[in-house]
Image: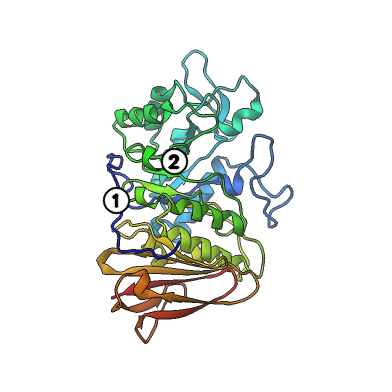
Amino acid sequence: PGSLLVAFVAATAGALDNGLGRTPPLGFNPWNCFGVDARGGCKLVNPHLPAPGCHPFNESTILSIGEALVKSGLRDLGFKYVNLDCGWTTGYRNLTTGHLIVNREKFPHGIKWLADALHSMGLQFGIYASASKTQCCSRKYGPSANDGSYEHEKTDAQDFASWGIDYLKYDNCDPFAESYKTMRDALNATGRPIFYSVHGPIGSEAVGLANAWRTTEDIDNTWSSFVERVAINDQYAQYAGPGGWNMPDMLEVGNFFDPALGNAESRTMMSLWAVVKAPLLIGTDITLERDPSDLTMSILGNPEVIGINQDALGEQARLVQSDGVGQVWAGNLDGGHRVLAAVNGDNSTALDITVDLSRVFGGASASFVARDLWKGETWEERVSGNVTLSVEPHDTLLLRLKP
């Protein structure tokens, strides 16, 4: 895009009024690291795990994740949602009652017990359902699988509330469009505040319907995948704000296994998801004992970067400059602060990116104190006008700018 003007105010027309999502949710979802698809294949093949490189999530996995969030300090930084994804049912409902059947091999104590356990850790608990006749991963059970929530929205919402659910991911999987609104109303009718995240309606269709909405298809642990998705997400910026957020899928931070570029790629993804105010749902195994050179946990737990994502203004930063290799994203923050992310798309060579701050932030007199959020350093001299930023391969320079 040419000259953009981060002097706009985010316009959110009637976000879902359930009191939730005033800032993007922070938490964990197991799909990107523990997901097993309808064909039994790993969503992620992790070279640090025994063959086949993944294992499905279950009760003990989810409890271990909760404990890791607490022990690592991530919970206290705001990462409070521990969510399930597809794979917690048997694929079927009870034909007499219509209630979903929990997979007791994976969750021997049931869902309410698990919710209570996570709540006792000071965490919140999320679950997965779909606006269809069958959940995505349950297709492996064949055409008789019937664990989708279409035409069962009220029953499922009541079950979720009775179990103590705090977050619902409502997927597509050959969806019925009317089911998204029906589920929203069913959740509201329970009287329990449940964050409502949908994959289906986007932009104007999602405002007033949900607290977050997917803007892209599923992500994977490659540079091209997340860079493409955050660019697609950019076109929906006008619809996001407190109460309703654009979501270019879940984080892959920690799943980039190139020893030379992994940390840089994780910093870049975390930077971009933070500035565009995307939900930050961790998708890497935080229970692993990682090599000291692996900075995943400190990247996820950088309080200043999280602060950008959780900024009270809730304005999504925009892509304001791109030449095919380098990118600049910029946006407004609360209190007149600004944020700027300079991204190097080259995987082998450092890149100098020149930014005209007066163009990006409107006004020739724009002058700022700059703080590098990844290094935790405040620059000695103020910045204004044209500024040249040096960025390492596949890395991002993330700056908070104070007038």
Find numbered disc 2 in the image and state the secondary structure of the residue it sits on: strand
Mark 1 Cα within 10 Å, few/some/many (few <14, many 20+)?
A: few
What is the quadrant of the N terminus in the image? bottom left
Q: Is residue 247 above or below residue 107?
A: below
Q: Earlier in the sequence, mark 2 or mark 1?
A: 1
Q: Position of residue 334 (x, y in %)?
A: 28, 64
| Quarter holding residue 392 | bottom right
Point out the residue furthest to the bottom here: 380
Residue named by callout 1: 11
Q: Is residue 241 above or below residue 94?
A: below
- In depth, the one of 160 and 215 nearer the eye is 215
Q: Is residue 345 above or below residue 134?
A: below
The amino acid type, in three-letter code, at marker 1 is Ala
The amino acid type, in three-letter code, at marker 2 is Gly
Residue named by callout 2: 126
Point out the residue furthest to the front here: 2
What is the quadrant of the C terminus in the image? bottom left
Tag nearer the camera, 2 or 1: 1
Mark 2 Cα within 10 Å, few/some/many (few <14, many 20+)?
A: many
Residue at point 46%, 51% (across, down): 233
- In depth, the one of 128 and 248 nearer the eye is 248
Mark 2 to mark 1: distance in Å? 28 Å
Find numbered disc 1 in the image and state the secondary structure of the residue it sits on: loop
